[in-house]
C-alpha cells in the first residue's frame, strides 16, 4: 500500500510540473479554468526560422488572446528584434481564437524567415487551442 501512495505522489508531482511548465507544449490552466497558455516549443519542432525553432507562448482568458510571447530561440538578435518591434506578436491580442484564425499575418521585411516561423508557430498554437 505504501508503494501505491508513493507512486501516486510521484505521479502528482510530475503531472503538476508538466501543467505549470512552459516547456510542455500542451494546454495548461494557469490561474483558473478560463485561463489557458499554449507553448509551441514541442508543437513546432519542425518550424524553423533562419537559425532554428522560434516557439511562442499564447495566453488566453475566456477564449480571448491576452498575450503572445516569443520564447527563447537562436535567431539573430537584431533580426528577431525587428519581428518583436513590428507589432506581429501584439496583432492578435484582444481577439478571440476564432477571430485570430482569420487574421492575415504578414512577414516582416528584413526578417522574413524568423517572422514566417513565428507566424507558423502562432497558427499551430491557435489550432491547438480548439
Image (cartoon, rainbow, N blue to C red):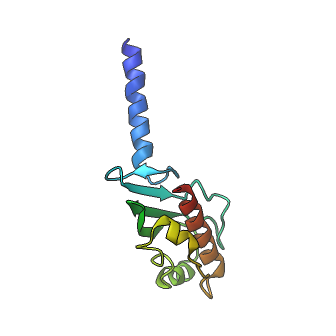
Q: Tell me what residue is drawn at x 35 percent, y 49 percent.
A: 33
- Picture quadrant of residue 9: top left
Where residue 117 sits: x, y (%)?
62, 71
Residue at the far top: name it: 1
Where residue 42 sits: x, y (%)?
58, 53
- Between 77 and 122, the one lying in front of the other is 122
Q: Is residue 64 left or right of residue 104?
A: left
The quarter in which the N terminus is drawn is: top left
Q: Is residue 16 left or right of residue 86?
A: left
Where residue 57 sits: x, y (%)?
47, 62
Q: Tell me what residue is drawn at x 43 percent, y 30 percent.
A: 11
- Picture quadrant of residue 61: bottom left
Q: Tell me what residue is drawn at x 66 percent, y 64 percent.
A: 47
Residue at the far bottom: name it: 109
Q: Can you say whether 121 is above or below 50 in the image?
A: above
Residue 76 in view (yes/no):
yes
- Between 26 and 95, the one lying in front of the other is 95
Q: Can you say whether 24 is above or below 93 in the image?
A: above
- Between 123 and 70, the one lying in front of the other is 123
Q: Tell me what residue is drawn at x 54 percent, y 78 percent.
A: 80
Q: Can you say whether 10 is above or below 63 in the image?
A: above
Amino acid at each position: 500500500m505504501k508503494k501505491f501512495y508513493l507512486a501516486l505522489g510521484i505521479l502528482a508531482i510530475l503531472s503538476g510540473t508538466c501543467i505549470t511548465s512552459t516547456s510542455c507544449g500542451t494546454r495548461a490552466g494557469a490561474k483558473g479554468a478560463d485561463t489557458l497558455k499554449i507553448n509551441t516549443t514541442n508543437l513546432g519542432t519542425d518550424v524553423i526560422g533562419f537559425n532554428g525553432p522560434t516557439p511562442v507562448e499564447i495566453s488566453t482568458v475566456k477564449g480571448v488572446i491576452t498575450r503572445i510571447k516569443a520564447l527563447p530561440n537562436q535567431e539573430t538578435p537584431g533580426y528577431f528584434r525587428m519581428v518583436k518591434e513590428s507589432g506581429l506578436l501584439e496583432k492578435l491580442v484582444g481577439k478571440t481564437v476564432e477571430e485570430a484564425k482569420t487574421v492575415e499575418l504578414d512577414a516582416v521585411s528584413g526578417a522574413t524567415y524568423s517572422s514566417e516561423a513565428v507566424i507558423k508557430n502562432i497558427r499551430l498554437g491557435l489550432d491547438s487551442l480548439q
